[in-house]
Image: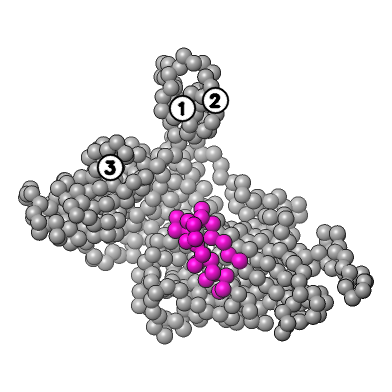
Amino acid sequence: LGIRVDGRDRLDYRQLEIETSVVSTANGSARVRLDHTDVLITVKMEMEPPLIDQPRNGKLYFFVNCSANAAPEFEGRGGEDLGTSLSSMLERVYSSPHTLDTSKLCVVPGKYVKGLYVDIEILECGGNLFDAVSLGVKAALWATKMPRIYITGEDGGELEFSVSDNPCDVDRVDVSNAPILITHLRITENLTVVDPTPEEECCGPVQIVVGVTPKGLITATQQLGSGTFTPQTLSASIKSARDLGVKIHQRLMEKLRQEENITDRPIKGFL
Amino acid sequence: MEIQLASELPRVKAMVGVQGSARPRLVTPGEIISQDTSFMRGHGTYMEEGVQVASVAGYVTRVNRLITVTPLRQVYQGAVGDTIVGRITQVQNIRWKVDVNSRLDAELRLSNIQLPGGEQRRSSLEDERGMRGLLREGDLVCVEVQKISDDGLLRLTARSNKFGKLSQGTLLAVSPSLIVQDKQRMHDLPCGARVVFGANGYVYITPTVPQEQTSTYTVNFEEVTVDVRKTIGRLRNCIKLLAYHSIMISPTSVMTAFDLSTEQEYEVKDLLKPDIMQDVAMATVQLMNE
C-alpha cells in the first residue's frame, strides 16, 4: 500500500544524528543515533608486525560489544551472536582492496604496520543496527588522526621511532571508498523496506544486508534471519541498495566535511 | 536520507511555563527533604539518621504534617477500575498471561471474559480446550483491572462489550505517567480513528468501526485504505512527539497536535524529524494554555 506505520515510504530512512571525536582518548571516534539506535565507535591505532603473506599491508580489526543496556536480550552473553555476526560482516565488507587501501598503513615493509582497532559499542538497539554501525565506522575512520611516525635511526638491528607531538602533524585514513551497509527487510512476497524499526523487524522473517562503496561497488552481501528471498526480490533489493548507498555516501561525506569546517566545535557528547 | 550533525539539532527546550509561585520542589533519591522530625513520612521517603530523605525522583507534596514524594515517571502500578491495553504472552490452563507494561505480567482468567455466544454461562471443558481459539499469544486486548494482589499481580477482566480483543491498528507505548486520568478511555476522534488510551501507557489506534453488539474474537481483516492509514500514522507520530517532550497525553492534546500538523501541511513522515517535532509540541502547549 506504499505507506508504513510511521508514514515513511519503503525506501525512507529515519533521521540520522552524527557526531565525531566524542572520545578524546581514542585516535578517532563517532557516535551515531538513528532514532532509538545508538552506537559508539572508537578507532585506536597500534604498531605491530604485519601478516607474513602481506608484508606491506596494514590491518583492520573490528570488535563489537552489545551492551546489556541496549536490549533485554543482550543480558549476559545474549549479545554475542549479534556481535560476532556484525563484526564478521564488517570484516568481509572491508576485506576488498577496493575499499580501504591498507598499503597506506604501512610503516616499515615487513617489519611494522599500523593496525587499526575499531571498537563498536552498541548502546541502544532501536532497529537497523547494521546500517547505523557501518555509517559510524566510516565517520570514525574519517575522524581518525594518527600521529606521524618518523624513523630516527637504527640501533643494533632494531629501528627507532619518534612519534610526532604536533596535533596537526597527523595522518588521516582515506575513506573515499569505505563502504556502508544497507539493510533490506522483507515484509511480504515482493516487498522490502529499508531502515526497519524494531516492530517492523519482528514482522519480517528475513533481511539482506548489502555493503556498498561510494562508487556503487558491492563488496559483500549477507542474508540474516530464517526466511527466503525470491530471485526477483533479491536482485531488486540489491539494485536499490546500491542506488541508495551512493546517495547516502554523498550526503554523509558532505556532512562530515561540514562538521570539520566548524571552528572550535563544542563536543555535545552524551549530555 | 537526512543526516544531521549533533551540533545542528535543537536543544530540547522547557515546555511548561511557570504558573505563579506554585513551582513544585523536585528532589532526587537521597536528597534530604527536611530536618524536622515532626513531619510524618509518606510514600517516597524514609528516615536516615534523624532526617527525612527522598527515595524516588519526583516532586514534594505536603499535606499538613505529611510529606510525600510523588515520582515523575513510574512503572505502571495498577489501580482497580483502570482500563488498560495488554498483549497476551502465554495461554495457560484456565487463564491467559498478559503483558501490561508493568513489573509482572497480569492474569486474565477464563471466567472473567465474555464467552462467545453472548449469553452469560459458565465456562465448560470445551471452552478450556478452545482457549487459544479465543485469544492466542500476541493478541492485543482491552481489559479492566479487577483486583491487585499483594505482590503487585493484576487480575484483569473483560466482561462488557467494550472490552475484548482489539482488531487492526497500531500500538504505541508511552510512560503511564503521561496519560491523563480519564473515566472514558476509548475515544472516537473526529479525524476518523478510534484511540484507546490505556492507563498503563499502551495507546492503541484503530480505524473507527460501527458499534458492535458483542465483543467478537474474530479479527476484522478488511483492508484499511491508505487515507485511514495516513491518519493513524499521523496520530501515532503526534502521540510520540508529545511523549518525547513530556506533554500530557489526552484526547484534546492529541487532536490539537494533529490539527496543527495538518494545518502546517507537514507530511506524516516529517513528524519524525526532531525540529518539526519540537515546533508542533511547543505550538500544542501554547494552544492548550490559552
Identity of the amino acid at label 2?
A: Ile
Residue A101, picture quadrant: bottom right
Q: Chain of mark 2?
A: B
Q: Are marks 3 and 2 on the same chain?
A: yes
Earlier-in-chain disc, 3 versus 2:
2
Q: Secondary structure at mark 1?
A: strand
Pointer 3: residues within 10 angstroms few (<14), some, or many (20+)? Answer: many
Residue at the (41%, 16%) spot, across then down: B64
Q: Which residues are magenta?
A: A63-89
Earlier-in-chain disc, 3 versus 1:
1
- Mark 2 and mark 1: Cα distance apart in space: 9 Å
Query: Relative to the observer, which residue lies in front, A81 or A250?
Result: A81
**Horizontal and vertical percent position of residue A128:** 49, 65
- Residue B210 can be seen, yes or no: no
Residue A75 colored in magenta in the image: yes
Q: Are marks 2 and 1 on the same chain?
A: yes
**Horizontal and vertical percent position of residue A166:** 86, 59
**Horizontal and vertical percent position of residue A269:** 64, 51
- Mark 3 and mark 1: Cα distance apart in space: 25 Å
Q: Are marks 3 and 1 on the same chain?
A: yes
The residue identified by callout 1 is B45
- Residue B54 can be seen, yes or no: yes
Residue at the (71%, 59%) spot, across then down: A26
